[in-house]
Amino acid sequence: MNQDTVSNATYKYYLTSLLAITATAFAVNASAYTGQELAKEAKVSLGEARAIALKIHPGKVTDEELEKEKGGGGLRYSFDIRHGKVTQEVGVDANTGAVLENAPEGKNPD
């Protein structure tokens, strides 16, 4: 094997590694949700609330947030869940896990 082949293989290895690290960093950052600073006040975790919401309306979560809002315990998770052409908004009380909302997303989404 000549020097150019070794250098080229090393270059491809480092480039592939860099791309994998970059993709992982973006994936981790994408998992952050709006309202994360309120999580310490919630008795129900984001994962538990997401599971409740997906049980009510299966699909792909396109947006999730934790917010203070009237109704229930005052703190709720809100999930936009897409299934086919329909996006459903499902609200889950962050203190009890009760479903507070389950309705098609309106024309003016949050």
Image (spheres, rainbow, N blue to C red):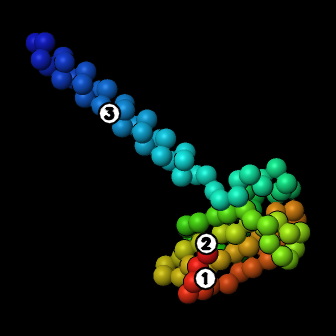
Whether the residues at callouts 1 and 2 have beta carbons within 8 Å, the answer is yes
Residue marked by disc 2: 80
Q: Residue at x 80, y 77 (%)?
A: 100
- How far apart marks 2 and 3 lie (CA) works out to 34 Å
Pointer 1 local density, CA inside 10 Å: few below 14, some 14–19, many at least 20:
some
Q: Is residue 8 above or below residue 68?
A: above
Whether the residues at callouts 3 and 1 have beta carbons within 8 Å, the answer is no
Three-letter amino acid code at the position of disc 1: Glu
Three-letter amino acid code at the position of disc 3: Thr
Label 1 sits on a secondary structure element that is loop
- Which percent across, then down, holds residue 8? 18, 23
The image quadrant where one finds the C terminus is bottom right
Residue marked by disc 1: 105
- Label 3 or label 1, whichever lies nearer to me, is 1
Frontmost residue, 85 versus 39: 39
Q: Residue at x 55, y 67 (%)?
A: 62
